[in-house]
Image (spheres, rainbow, N blue to C red):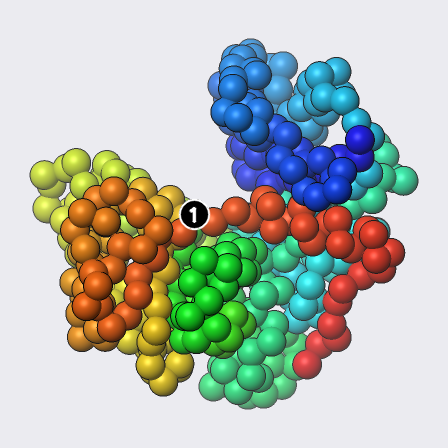
Amino acid sequence: MDTILVVNAGSSSLKFEVFSVAGSLTRLVKGKMEGIGTAPHLSIRNAGGEQLANDDYPSEAIPDLPSAMRLVGQWLGERLEGHLIAVGHRVVHGGPNHAGPARVDESLLRELEWYTPLAPLHQPNNLAPIRVLLERQPDLAQVACFDTAFHRGHDPMTDHYAIPTRYFEEGVRRYGFHGLSYEYVAGRLAEVAPDVGGGRVIVAHLGSGASMCALHEGRSVESTLGFTALDGLPMGTRCGQIDPGVLLYLLEQHGMSARQLQDMLYKESGLKGLSGISNDVRDLLDSQEAGAALALDHFVHRIGLNAGALAAALSGLDAFVFTAGVGENSPVMRERIARKLRWLGVSLDTERNNAGELLISSDDSTVKVFVMPTDEELMIARHTFALITAGGTVSAGAR
């Protein structure tokens, strides 16, 4: 049995899934190593949800990502049958050159490292396991799957900033992110609701990282995220849209360094910065503090504003989809957001919403509203299998 390993690495965690490619892609196991370097914990379940591992380790045993990969690789090698034919990786930023997944080599890795300043919370961690595997198993096929790739088909006009065009040629442009999630949702929506799946759709990927995407005929035409993963909606710890003049003010009047400014915008802002309490929507919903209410009100308000902009880009709206952690699991937040969208024709069915059904809009809603779990890992597995069986890279040149 041939298998594909999917890896999504973070700063202190390593998420992974293994798929069989016998006949069709079948998920075998899903796991996560958390607390790397502090309180390492490995949890693994099979496709049926049965717990296969639930183990703690001393911090010195798993001090870094390479050691976590070594332990996970050993566990998988000892307990799973099959032959590993490829590893697919989530890579947040693919830059302007990649409109699809790409086979990894040293040249690609060097290219992707250049985009680290544009995604400092994600890119270094996404690339670390690629580097480790290149060194340890250079003959093992690796595929990078980019969160930016799904948005590369935009009209160039939408990706320009109103600054001198020479910077666009340098790569300063709107990229958009969460593309693997949007790509999966677009395909799934076409399957379950073909009457609207090919129409005008807004997908709201609402988690610790949050963004929205306008789809037409299943393709991205506009996104709230831009050059970096800071734009658009406020997120767990990221600021979202901000007047560049605020940044100039902080640099000039507060004497902040670029590093201090980066840390504030990526790690101390968003829901955490507004509330002064937490970056977790669940904590804020449970809190009676004024800061919690402010953060949630701001979050809902900005979603409403951005939905209006995306609906304008689509010249109307046929469907709205909630996905990711908050979107999939919080009926309260879905209801609050839907109220902001009434002017667009959105009306929820309370019972359907509270039950988290696939279709949660009322029968008289002119816009259909869905709750749709995303599956970025399956999307990565699909891309990886397609690329290695095709034997080449799926990549487009810079525009």
Q: What residue is drawn where x is 54% and y is 13%?
A: 55
Residue drawn at point x = 61 percent, y = 72 percent = 152
Determine whether the residue tagged by mark 1 lies in a helix, strand or loop: loop
Left or right: 339, with 61 as reference point? left
Identify the residue position indicated by label 1 in the image: 373
Q: Position of residue 73 (x, y in %)?
A: 72, 24
The C terminus: image quadrant:
bottom right
Q: Is residue 18 left or right of residue 196?
A: right
Callout 1 amino acid: Pro
- Can residue 105 be seen? yes
- Asked whether residue 248 is in view, the answer is no
> Which residue occupies the extreme right position in the image?
139
Above or below for 174 versus 21: below
x then y, percent, for residue 395: 75, 67
Q: Residues within 10 Å of mark 1 (few under 14, many from 20)?
A: many
In-front residue for pair 148/228: 148
Q: Nearer the viewer, residue 266 or 140?
A: 140
